[in-house]
Image (cartoon, grey):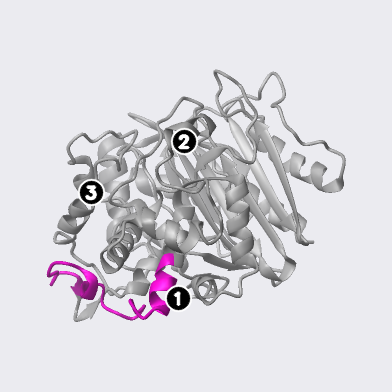
Amino acid sequence: MKKTFLLLLIASSVNLCAQQADLATHHAVNDSLVAMFNRQAFEESYNLLSPNVQKKLDLKKWVKLLKNDLFMGLGQVKKSEFLENQNGAYLYKWSFEKMIIQTSIVVYQSKLIEGIYFKPFVEKAKKRTVAAATDNALKTGLDRTVDSVARTYIENVNTAGLSIGIIKNGETFTYHYGETDKKNPKLPNDKTIYEIGSISKTFTGLLLAHAVLQNEVNLEDDIRKYLPQDYPNLVFKGQPILIKHLTNHTARLQSFPVEDITAQKGYDASNPYKHYTSDMVLSYLHKVKLDTFAGIKSEYSNFATGLLGIILEKKFKKSYADLLQTYITTPLSMTDTKITIPKADFVRFAKPYDEAGNPANYWDITGLAAAGAIRSTLSDMLTYAKANMTATDSAVLLTQKATFKDSPNNETGLFWQLSTTSDGNQIIWHNGGTGGFRTFCGFIKSKNLAVVLLSNGGDDVTQKGLELMKVLRQ
């Protein structure tokens, strides 16, 4: 993640059943937020956030984001323009004195903000002049359904390749679009390698589940029990961080400790975690000052997940890569799922591209490997999805047991997001993203339905995955 990337994220999960407000309401909320921002009424603007968002983001951090990160760095908003409704998120172009930001806002009937997301503005991608290549034969209803969803993603000129896998009623279907390399166009296939980003966290959750069932770790234990040094600072008013808090993003450990990560020797914003070692993670922990009790507020944390991976490594005296091989990839015969790709297989590794369609770097994640370092293929990820969807194994089932309730219809297990839809189905899912890849994996056990999307581009595929699941579960 680049230091210049501005992000405020609402929820780590998506409320799949709440009714959204109309366009006029979104405009009114956006205009109110801009007006308060420009007159520096940062604390007052906090009242525009729903109670659900306020639980995840306290007033102090909200004010810091608006005042320090935005206002002091970019000045006032000179102009606000509505762009589009993108899968329920209303996009606005905020033109500051020094930079242009895209602001995504989600408002429900309460007329309060349920989600807000800031990032540098990129001009809307033009459509390809020539339709993206595909192996979709368009012979069946499923073929046409997949194509209708995939085309709205892949036809943007900034995108590269997209692989889609579906398991429905015991049958497996795969589809591929675009190219693995824009300079040397070649259609992806089932064995094309992608970085899966934060879907890696669900693998970490499964490793933890094995440790719990072997009585090596307890979810209710103070994390300091498993750390090699003393950390008297990792407690708030007598209450410590527990192991389970690392898995549901309530540990109060920030996701990206900017000052620490950017201070690493050899830091490169395009490959930010490459030199950030386990020792640096443990050293930074001494600087942490908890602002509230763990287990109360959800705030997505790559750092917390990486720390859990280090705890598991020290407990089992094995590297994270070796643990993956021992407990997951070898038992499931996922031969292409690895952290380090052998040179002989690199020809299958899709080239990464950012949101603007420019070449990006692969991400080499070391000390925080458990948070997002895994590379895999569509074939292997379908194997993984099926193993989770049809599981009778105690460790897998433990990962799908809720450890925190984010909102009435959204819970978190051992990293898996557990979302209940308006029609009563539970979607178990996670998404991922690195510098040049975006991914999604989700399944509905009661429908025997699983969907996997892997892309070597910077545009998020989460909504496309959820859209497919909505159509296919009918």
Q: Is mark 1 on a helix, strand or loop?
A: loop
- Residue 389 visible to an observer of this rendering: yes
Q: What residue type is labelled 3?
A: Thr
The residue indicated by pointer 1 is 403
Sequence-earlier tag: 3 or 1: 3
On the image, which quarter does residue 177 sit in? top right
Q: Exactly how many numbered labels are in the figure?
A: 3
Viewer-proximal residue among 229 and 356: 229
Cα–Cα gap, marks 3 and 2? 22 Å
**The disc label shown at residue 436, or none:** 2
The residue indicated by pointer 3 is 277
Q: What stretch is highlighted in magenta?
A: 207-235
- Residue 19 visible to an observer of this rendering: no
Q: Which amino acid does label 2 sit on?
A: Gly
Q: What residue type is labelled 1?
A: Thr
**The disc label shown at residue 222, or none:** none
Q: What element carries label 3?
A: loop
Q: In this view, does 326 lie to the left or right of 85?
A: left
Q: Is residue 135 left or right of residue 71?
A: right
Which one is in front in this view, the residue at disc 3 or the one at disc 2?
A: 3
Cα–Cα gap, marks 3 and 1? 29 Å
